[in-house]
Amino acid sequence: MTNEETKQLATSIFDFIPKLRDKFFLPVNVVRIHELSSRQSEVLLALAHTGPLTMSELAKIANISNQLLTSVVNYLESIEYVKREPLPENKRTIKIDITEKGIAVLKSYKERVVKEIVKVLDTVSDEDAEKLIQILNSFYEIIDKYPGKRQK
């Protein structure tokens, strides 16, 4: 692929994200997980996806400073969505993990989002739905081949 083609693909991916948000999330008002901020939601989702992480690992994945992450984790811990656990081999290193209550909140959120997306998809023709399925399957197949990288 040429540099220009790579740039065009990157631009298309970048432009796709707001379209996806606008078509499937904003109209149904489900972008927030209960009353959590976007940062709090991102941290909770990251932990659900990755499992327990140190504060440094979580800050890197969530793309926020350790200082800001501390206040986010403090709040999530106060409402029992996450817990702090010291590593047995190094008590000074703390891992953050999602709790059963946090998992339940995400499950409820996902059910709500899926229900609302179904309403949008009910307006899609069978032909377009089949195309979307094929495209998403291809997208997942391709994207899963490559390691993700998050930068600060």
Image (tube, helix red, strand yellow):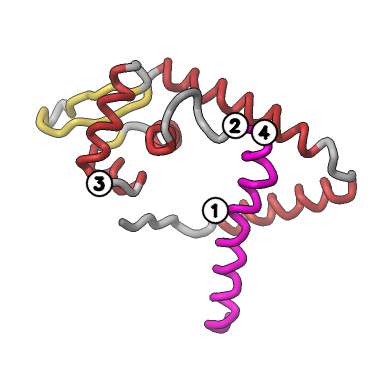
Magenta residues span: 1-30
Say what secondary structure mark 1 lies in. Answer: loop
Question: Disc 1 vs disc 2: which is toward the camera?
Answer: 2
Q: Is residue 28 magenta?
A: yes
Question: Disc 3 vs disc 1: which is toward the camera?
Answer: 3
Say what secondary structure mark 4 lies in. Answer: helix
Graded by Cα atoms within 10 Å as few (under 14), some (14 to 19) or many (20 or more), the crowding at tag 3 reads: some
Q: Which mark sits nearer the N-terminus, 3 or 1? A: 3
Residue type, label 3: Ser
Residue type, label 1: Asp
Question: Disc 4 vs disc 3: which is toward the camera?
Answer: 4
Residue indicated by mark 1: 144
Q: Do the CB atoms of the residues marked 4 and 3 lie less than 8 Å apart?
A: no
Occupied quadrant, residue 113: top right
In this view, 70 is above or below 106: below
Residue indicated by mark 4: 28
Q: Where is residue 56? Give x, y as percent.
A: 23, 43
Residue type, label 4: Val
Residue 15 relative to residue 42: left or right: right
Residue sitting at 62 percent across and 32 percent down? 29
Residue type, label 2: Val
Residue indicated by mark 2: 30
Q: Where is residue 135? Give x, y as percent.
A: 73, 55
Graded by Cα atoms within 10 Å as few (under 14), some (14 to 19) or many (20 or more), the crowding at tag 2 reads: some
Residue 106 relative to residue 111: left or right: left
Q: Which mark sits nearer the N-terminus, 1 or 4? A: 4
Residue indicated by mark 3: 65
3D distance between C-alphas at marks 3 and 1: 28 Å
Say what secondary structure mark 2 lies in. Answer: loop
